[in-house]
Amino acid sequence: MATNRKHVAWVVAAVAIAAVPLSFFGPAELRLAVIGLLMLAGPGTALVLYLRLTSADTDDADGAVADGTGAHRYAKQSALPLAIAIAVASSLALSTIVATAMVFARVWSPPAAVFVLSLITLLLLILGANRSREPQTGAS
């Protein structure tokens, strides 16, 4: 079953938007889940979607592979673990960079850090959406 990039982008955007008010108030368990998910996978998933690191057949709603060869299908499916690893690593790196910058600037505020990470995530999602609308032209 193929995942549609638009669905992933909508879920990531929903988590990024929900994390901002939850950083100020809300049930502790829900805050932990949403903000933890944002820090673990938010900006990185948006970066992977922007860079188009996942396979091209994930855009199809029915999941059909264009040329139908088995080796090609396996190569495209094997890109998913790499994309997940890059998403998690870059999200944790961005979270660390934001926290370190706030400590050095002496303006430590966890809600502000969540807001910055949400902005980065939403900006990358918007850039990725604009990039996917551009016509695919190039030398063949």
Image (cartoon, helix red, strand yellow):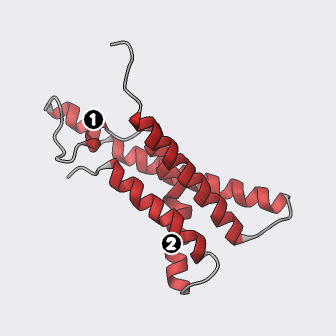
Numbered label attached to residue 34: 2
The disc at residue 75 is: 1
For the point 56% across and 84% down, which residue is it? 26
Could you tell whether 75 is left or right of 51 in the image? left
* Image-quadrant location for residue 55: top left
Quadrant assignment, res 54: top left
Q: Is residue 138 above or below residue 102?
A: above
Q: Residue at x 52, y 65 (%)?
A: 17
Task: Name the amino acid type tagged 1.
Answer: Ala
Work out which quarter of the rendered image holds the C terminus and state it.
top left
Q: Is residue 15 above or below residue 91?
A: below
Q: Secondary structure at mark 2?
A: helix
- Who is closer to the viewer here, 39 or 8? 8
Whether 111 is drawn above or below 7: the answer is below
Give the image location of residue 75, x and y in percent: 27, 35
Residue at the (23%, 43%) spot, across then down: 60
